[in-house]
Image (spheres, rainbow, N blue to C red):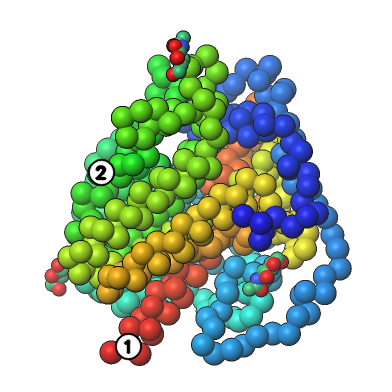
Amino acid sequence: MGKDQPSYSFTKKFLPWSFYCIIPIAIFRLYFYPLHLVPQSTTDQLPNTQHTVITFSSSSINREEKRVFETPCDFTNGSWVHDKMGPLYNGTACATIKEGQNCIAHGRPDLGYLYWRWKPNQCKLPRFDPHTFLQLLSHKHLAFVGDSVARNQLESLLCMLSTVSVPNLVYRDGEDNKFRRWHFASHNVSISVYWSPFLVKGIEKSKSDNLNKLYVDYVDERWAADLDQIDMIVLSFGHWFLHPAVYFEGDSALGCHYCPGLNHTEIGFYDVLRKALKTTLKTITERTGSNGNVKDVILTTFAPSHFEGDWDKAGACPKTKPYKEGEIFLEGMDADMRNTEVEQVEEAKENAKQFKGLRLEALDVTRLSLMRPDGHPGPYMHPNPFANGIQEHVQNDCVHWCLPGPIDTWNQIMLEVIRRWEGQSRREE
Ligand SMILES: *[C@@H]1O[C@H](CO)[C@@H](O)[C@H](O)[C@H]1NC(C)=O
Ligand SMILES: *[C@@H]1O[C@H](CO)[C@@H](O)[C@H](O)[C@H]1NC(C)=O
Ligand SMILES: *[C@@H]1O[C@H](CO)[C@@H](O)[C@H](O)[C@H]1NC(C)=O
Ligand SMILES: *[C@@H]1O[C@H](CO)[C@@H](O)[C@H](O)[C@H]1NC(C)=O
């Protein structure tokens, strides 16, 4: 913490605790019971989540460009610049997009959000090259593990790779496609997705029980049992932690988050997220480090949502352009989640030093995603939402990302991380 919470970001600190309680509940009702809109009385209480926009003239932007060769480019700081080329694929051509993220097919009228590319301050981010990606992953198995944002990133990657090679779905299990695997025969690359919204063992809320239950010192074996068949793992989670939950550690209850009426201490969710990630990274390190398998671990950092005003009204995330650098700051919950994740990856890197071949990296997309309020499906999570005029209640998705869209950039950066690893191992040989 600290680094990304400059002193001018005081607004969120003074927001009442309820900010962190009510919003997530509303969001989660939306995601998991999308057909049941919350009653008007609840939505009326929603505080406005619009980010405070502060502009300032920065001298730091003109800071001397450091192009030290040994220092790898920091992809996290930069700006979105216009790009005539547009995306690698479109929704009609890609077969693996989840309905709710196929914004163009659902009638989203503005397409300007497709014509931006991320420009890091210190370097150029190359356009995603599907051939290179498949070559680097040849004979390997890449697994995405996490929540629906992990799935969103996976589907972006599949669409980009599909432009050069057609994947075969070779495995599927679970309702709503929660566990799937594809095979790219051209390069013998396997890519899979494992549903595990906490990474650790957990019991997800159900209609009869509104609380998640998390066991922070056990990994979720639904993915971890397959670790010996996975060469590279992308972890992505966070949003499920905002929801009411009871936490267990060892044999006893650790506390809870937003569980009025239950005899547990409110402990928030940051420490629990930290513990869950620590357990996850420690388990991967121990299980793979001890048998000497090369294992690459990438953690995609928390991606902010962009709800403004009432989440169930038209215009819940209405922006059609990215924020400019200096127009929005990483702060509050988004910054805390991201910082906790980056800190845990750094700690795991230290622990992994004793094991040759284990590589970990944070794919730090929080800031660049924060700057893309225009990248969400919003009402276009459903086909043609305004076909019968603007209704009183409009479901909006301001958490996930349209495909194609800004989330493609995450995979573009991931390819650079993998390339960098490859370069390093070549030099070491
Ligand atoms: C990135 O930007 C933040 C805030 O603007 C700054 O504090 C940080 O030093 C920058 N990082 C790099 C590597 O330039
Ligand atoms: C989408 O892809 C299809 C098939 O490649 C192509 O025919 C169509 O023109 C594309 N649409 C847009 C909007 O680029
Ligand atoms: C394909 O890749 C898998 C690992 O994902 C490996 O076990 C298998 O031997 C490879 N097959 C061929 C034909 O190289
Ligand atoms: C609540 O928990 C405390 C401490 O664990 C215990 O002493 C107390 O009896 C519990 N109260 C109820 C109503 O269960």
Compare residues 259 and 419 and report the one nearer the observer.
259
Name the quadrant of the C terminus.
Answer: bottom left
Q: Which mark is residue 222?
A: 2
Query: Of callouts 2 and 1, which one flags the residue occurring earlier in the amino acid sequence?
Result: 2
Instruction: Decide: is 352 above or below 33.
Output: below
Quarter residue 333 falls in:
top right
**Residue kind at label 1, given as amino acid type:** Glu
Residue visible at 39% across and 74% down in the picture: 418
Measured Cα–Cα span from mark 2 to mark 1: 35 Å
Q: How many marks?
A: 2
Residue visible at 40% across and 42% down in the picture: 198
Compare residues 302 and 395 and report the one nearer the observer.
302
Compare residues 157 and 238 and report the one nearer the observer.
238
Residue visible at 25% across and 50% down in the picture: 224
**Residue 164, x across and y down, in percent:** 36, 72
Name the quadrant of the N terminus.
Answer: bottom right
Q: Which residue is mark 1?
A: 428
Q: Secondary structure at mark 1?
A: helix
**Residue 228, x across and y down, in percent:** 19, 59
